[in-house]
Image (spheres, grey):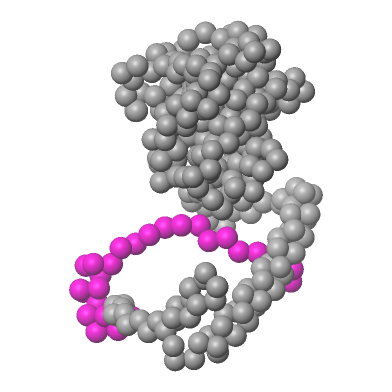
Amino acid sequence: MSATILVSTENLSYEDWLEYRKAGIGGSDASVVCGISRYKSPVELWMEKTGQMPPREAGEAAYWGNRLEALVREEFAKRTGMEVSKPSVILRSEEHPFMLANLDGTCEHPDHGACIFEAKTASAYRAGEWEDSIPDEYMVQVQHYMAVTGYAGAYIAVLIGGNTFRWTFVERDEELIAMLIELESDFWAHVRSEIPPALDGSDASSKFLSERFPSSVPKSKIVLPDEAGELLLQYDEACEQLKALTEQKQRVENLLKQMMGEYEIGTAGERVITWKSVSQERLDSKTLKAEHPTLYKKYANQTSYRRFTIKAAC
């Protein structure tokens, strides 16, 4: 498998870079397509690729990860003696044009030849994930890159907690790559057809449904398919679990409040608990409407939304 250059990233603006990312599935998208990302759902990614939702802005962790990429690359070269080059291009798979790669670097393995280099940063709280392996989302990412480039291996170097540096070598996994190609091909078919993938419990799915069906037809009625019965059972079970967990949470909160009494701040190990007195001023809209209806009408805003309810059978 070989790759072609989609575009040079030299002097490419961030806005243009985001536009080119819509042209296919990148390495950081692969874990989302597989459903193992902790930060994004497949529906949200689909909405981004189809232009229905702007890409989520990078948080502090992503910002510093990007800023420290060069430092991790330099430290890896220093400790291993390997020369690491940084390709300033976005690559596209010739065989599967929907697969893209924006590499942190490339280097030479003594046995495997040209290899991927991937730089990561991680907080000290996630150090355990790097003890004997690498997080699944990063394994999927580098295998995606190997699928695009045809390379036989990848080095992943990570700076953990700002003071622990590690690296590992990952060999090409043909079975995993075949699975990725199948899943990404199916996902890209959804992008091209603009038909969403299976909806899930994400905010993106809710947003999609609200925008797709913004209003109801008055008095309209439909007999739902048989699958609705199983979904209703799942809904009832989730409601029971939520009720139990809510009661458990409230019980714990009440016990902690009892321990704190009149104290505002409590500590337990490294955890800090606060129970502060807060004063707020709120507009009494009910009284305003009754005593000054003209003024209320002048400043009142009318909003429209669809309320979802499930009632017991009569």
Q: Is residue 77 above or below residue 134?
A: above
- Res. 33 visible in picture: no
Residue 52 quadrant: top left
Above or below, 289 relative to 298:
below
Which residue: 28% across, 67% down? 300
Question: In the figure, is residue 46 to the left or right of 294?
Answer: right
Residue shown at the point (70%, 40%) measured from the top left: 132
Magenta residues? Answer: 286-314
Q: 206 or 227: nearer the eye?
A: 206
- Dividing the picture into quarters, in which one does residue 302 lie? bottom left
Residue 55 or 286: which is nearer the viewer? 55
- Left or right of 238? Residue 252 is left
Instruction: Find residue 225 and report its horizontal and vertical position in percent.
Output: 75, 48
Q: How many numbered marks appear?
A: 0
Q: Up-down: is 10 above or below 249? A: above
Instruction: Indicate the quadrant containing the N terminus: top left, top right, bottom left or bottom right.
Output: top right
**How far across and how far down the image is residue 64, in percent?**
41, 41
Q: Tell me residue 130's x, y (percent).
A: 63, 42
Viewer-closest of 286 and 35? 35
Q: 143 or 18, which lies in front?
A: 143
The residue under the point 52% across, 69% down is 270
